Amino acid sequence: MTTPHNYLALDLGAESGRAIVGSLAGDKLSLNEVHRFCNGPVRLPDGMHWDVLRLWSEIKSGIASAVKCGAKLEGIGLDTWGVDFALLDKNKALLSNPFHYRDARTDGMLEEAFKRLPRAEIFASTGIQFMQINTLYQLLAMSLQKSPLLDMAKTFVTVPDLFNYFLSGEITNEFTHTTTTQCLDPRTRDWARPMLDALNIPTRFFGPVTNPGTQIGTLLPDIAEETGAGGVRIVAPACHDTGSAVVAVPARNQDFAWISSGTWSIMGVEAAQPSLNQKALEYNFTNEGGVFGTWRLSKNIMGLWLVQECKRTWARQGEDLSYDEITRLASEAKPFLAVVDPDHHSFLHAGDMPERIRKYCADTNQPVPQTKGEVVRVALESIALRYRWTLEKLEELTAKRFAPIHIIGGGTKNRLLNQFAADATNRVVVTGPVEATAIGNVLMQAIALGHLGSLADARAVVRASFEVEEYHPAHSSDWDEAYAKLLTLLDSNIL
């Protein structure tokens, strides 16, 4: 019997974190979640932050829980959401709790950036889509506010690089995560220093970039003793959670599209080169780093955030519905009542999402959804229509046809949205695995430690180990009519 190799994936999302032990025996991978914890913003007088010290405590608890479960760990890898960062002083001490990307300090920063550099020049320097949450605009806000932290900072680290430093004592700037910052030049794979200089953003604290799948050190002795894990090796997988998730796409062909479905829906394709042309700029697509020399040509879409905020709003109002109940109400509601642009700026921040959806419909002279089911159905249909728009633009940019569409991540549990995705795009949709990010994290550790040979080997393991579900399109003219409405809303920019 093959002795399994055990790895710990520390997977931190914007709402929760997990510690998952992956055991690889031959071509089969099994997962065991040993620790789960909540995550979310902490409001302070100066804005919205992440509580990284509590998260660090949870990370150590996750390692200890893996040891208590009897796993002899060979590797530990960590991934997180994108764009957020920390600054360290000359002694490599944390200067401040990192800000949360939804903090309002970046309001208006896109316009401020364009006063200093044309939009096209920023895109040519970075290849990243324009979103006010990006690191670039967080740093610009700090520069304009003359934050003393910028003067004190000696080292910049993204959030996963901060935790990797806490784990190993080594400073890294992992490639897949640094590309989310909109501060990296995709042609040189180094920081876009001329652009940063033009925006008056310091560049002295940016360090060398580390490739995904790199062994960066071993667990520090005090952490090893505290958790009982010993001197286990620390691996930088793809430290951006989407980068790890795409590793776990169980694709059999090259020309597939993928959607990482969760709070955000990130839709894209795997490309050999970044796309930096005028059309990619016009469509606001992004070129984020992948593994083994690939790029993720993709676009962020406001995904199940719309439904999550509806759920939170109704809970505050005294009706704490489950996601299953909310989805059931949506399935029973009237179809194609109205269409919203899920990426409209009014949906970005936390708040009364049902009222915002109703206001958008009223402001665009559409029927206004009244019931909870109608509100959520409008949101889900609109997300699926955004998938169609994104797929069409991906095919235009690459001159390829992509099929099937692989949907991975926690959002695969929303079977209604999965079917809507197939119907709206008129493509077969393959869903699973749910824990794609943790799986990709584990498989990159296995490759880094020499237990798997390639990305193709890793995806073969996924196919052998996890079940998927197929959704076949039931396309109708109603979807075409709804899509025409979305195009009109996008073209008119009336809001």
Image (tube, rainbow, N blue to C red):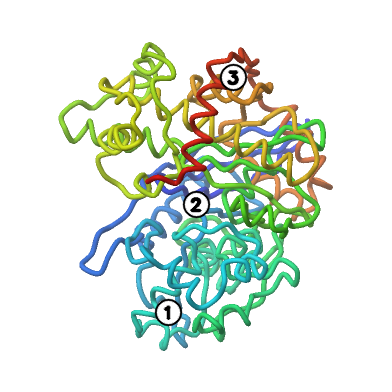
- State the SS at label 3: helix
Q: Nearer the viewer, mark 2 or mark 3?
A: 3
Q: Position of residue 243 (x, y in %)?
A: 64, 50
| Residue depicted at x 81% and y 40% | 457
Give how far apart the Cα atoms at labels 1 and 3 are.
Answer: 51 Å
Which of the 4 quarters of the picture holds residue 106? bottom left
Q: In which quarter of the view is residue 30 placed?
A: top right
Q: Tell me which amino acid carries mark 2.
A: Ile
Q: Identify which residue is drawn at 76% across, 37% down.
A: 459
Helix, strand or loop at label 2? It is: helix
Q: CA distance from mark 2 to mark 3?
A: 42 Å
User: Label 2 belongs to which residue?
Assistant: 63
Q: Nearer the viewer, residue 484 or 404?
A: 484
Q: Dot 1 corresponds to which residue? A: 93
At mark 1, the secondary structure is loop
Give the residue number, with chain letter if any, for mark 3: 423
Mark with earlier residue (2, 3) = 2
Q: Are marks 1 and 3 in contact (CB under 8 Å)?
A: no
Q: Does 463 sit left or right of 335 as displayed?
A: right
Is the residue 152 above or below the residue 338 in the image?
A: below
Disc number lying in front (2 or 1): 1
